[in-house]
Amino acid sequence: MSVILGSNQAMFVVWGAEGTLLYNDAYSEILAAKHPAAVGQPFLKVWNEIERDLIPIVAQAFAGEPVHMNDIELHMERKGYREEAHFAFSYTPVREESGAIAGFFCACTETTGQVLAERKAAAATARQRRLFQQAPGFITILGQPDHIFEFVNDAYIRLFGDREYIGRTVREVFPELEGQGFFEWLDHVYATGERYSAHHVPARLRLSPQGPDVERFLDFIYEAVVDEAGQATGIFCEGYDVTESHGAQAALRQNEARLRELNATLEERVADALAERRILAEVVETTDAFIQVVDPDYRWLAVNRASADEFERIYGVRPKAGDSMLDLLENQGEHQAQVRAVWARALGGEAFTHIDAYGDPDRERRYYEMKFNILRDPQGGIIGAYQFVYDVTDRLRRDAELAQAQEALRQSQKMDAMGQLTGGVAHDFNNLLMPIIGSLDMLQRKGVGDARSLRMIDGALQSAERAKTLVQRLLAFARRQPLQPQAVDVGALVHGMEDLLASTVGPRIQISLDVPADLTAAVADANQLEMALLNLAVNARDAMPDGGTLSIALAAENLEHHHGIDLRPGAYLRLCVHDTGVGMDQETRAHATEPFFSTKGIGRGTGLGLSMVHGLAAQLGGALTIESELGEGTTIKIWLPIAEAISGAAAKATDPQARPGSGTVLLVDDEALVRASTADMLTDLGYRVIDVQSADEALRRLEEEVSVDVLVTDHLMPGMTGTELAAAVRQRRADLPVLLISGYADAEGIGPDVTRLTKPFRQAELGAAVAKLLLHRRP
């Protein structure tokens, strides 16, 4: 309650069977004159003037269902005068420990500013539209996709006719403009953002459905409408009708056409008409488009060969002129109803374009784009309808694949950006940890202080090591951590993650572990395996929204030939993760390990979890399988090779011991604290240390100090990097060994022959690395 009273947001609580009202100061402004008498009163009594409206809301809240109301208008006195205010209310049921509903909590958000701003914007838009209406020329605004009409002024309607504009594309409203260049100019302006202007352009327009094409001459400008990012979102068009200035030439052309027509003989005109009809019939018959003409009784007036072939292919019956479409599909009731419904719209006088799937699934079902138009008699009466149809199945599939690829690219870019950020933070954090761990390690080794001080040093060192482990996990998440396979006690790893898994899946999910004590170690990367197990736990949690059981089991298994898994025969450790959730159908299982595939919806998952686990298992020489049925839960099994399959050097997990040394070390690091800590370690090991803060300074010292035995350099430094420094040193002194240290495990540009040490490290690790380099150098 203290949170509510101290909040600047209006809040109140209705509690108990009496519905007692308790509220904060912010809510008292909404109550106005009802405050302070409303405190402790029944909520419905306080608002008795709207009690009938509140009763169902209160009942719903006490029934355990949240209620959200937006844009509630109130008139209230807050600043000495009565004003209009708008609010959004959100009612949330409050339960006792027993689970019973004790009341509800309501948060009130004032939206007055937003409502008034929307009104102001609407008024500004209306004012702009009035200005456009009063303009002397014709104006239209086209949106995307496909140049959809968003606005036309009265001058535009007077010029081009009272058509159905808004919400339709230019191609739909003006099909007669096809081939006249207008559509191409629009496409060019939208694609490039360049302005296009033209003068005295002829345009053939059909000002009435059955009327002839009328030629008009136009001056116009196409201007791209761009957003804040400079991307075109539409086109603004302004122009004038300049037909009158071409009147004399038009009249001359008409007179010449009449003269040519009078000079032609009747036989020639008949022959021309017949030839034109034959050409048209041949074009219609041989085109790949499916063309049908139907009368009001659903009988075919005409159907071209391509359409008849396609109809027979998908329905098993062949149509011809004179047949009834409904009779032909009489034994296919579902398809008959689908065909009748779409043709009824056209026969009812609607010209439209429609995309849908047609055909018997037992034969073949395809997607078609159908453009319907009306067939009228000279008096304008409807005598039928016709359609042009194209198979767009492949196009839609390509569009879907392109959209999926674009979404996958966006997800990949997002993950890469997150990886860059996380890796950079880990780099800086490792530099901070380096002097902490180095100093604590040296204090512990020297036994500085009394017993209490030593315990404190040991505790601090343990915490620093945990921070080091956390950074390694960050790098693993950022995919900046190269895979480091070694012998891993998977049972101990699972037990060590039990608390983390429990906090991840929540209290409604019970965790069951079956981990035998005598299991053989497996080949794995411990950090990556922890991330994989955490990913699987999150997936299991999302699959059990109402709670359930997450079971994790480990077992050794010998796989023989023909075991059904894409693995070589041999000994493996099987990690089994099972949930009692909703499960997957066959199609989901088939795609579950594909990158970016997710069933969680937009914004709830990257689709990378299972694909990362699958890739990890394969990279380690193992495999992943999925067993799942809808309603039966899901079992993910990961097979990992046992530790004998890895080389002895990689399988060892010993703690290196400090090795005393002698010689001169040139130390390069731009971080003063890291450089000082590393120098102290080397000095304590017996080395003479020359420390510098940049690669340029290191090259100068090498010219002066010929006695340098080994170069120890940081990788990421301002100016020249450690990798570039190593290359420059090898040109001067090819025999000088180089140890590259870095707090960021991005290996780009680092040759495989360069010895690396990852920050933060202890003195023993540093001493072992330097001693090894000197050992290989000396004869």
Image: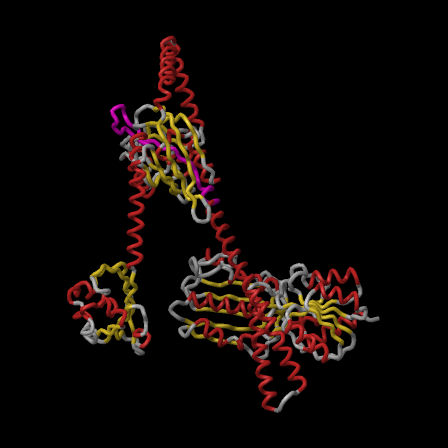
What residue span does the magenta drawing correspond to? Answer: 372-398
Q: Dividing the picture into quarters, in which one does residue 54 lie?
A: bottom left
Residue 378 image position (x, y, % from top left): 27, 23
Check the image and report above or below for 274 versus 472: above
- In-front residue for pair 545/719: 719
Query: Can residue 291 be spotted in the picture?
Result: yes
Q: Tell me the quadrant of the picture where the C terminus can be found.
A: bottom right
Query: Can residue 323 be spotted in the picture?
Result: no
Residue 588 image position (x, y, % from top left): 46, 57
- How many numbered circles are shown? 0
Would you say 498 lies left or right of 382 here?
right
Q: Tell me the quadrant of the picture where the N terminus can be found.
A: bottom left
**Residue drawn at point x = 42 percent, y = 58 percent:** 601
**Residue drawn at point x = 72 percent, y = 75 percent:** 768
Check the image and report above or below for 743 versus 114: below
- In-front residue for pair 666/446: 666
**Residue drawn at point x = 31 percent, y = 68 percent:** 9
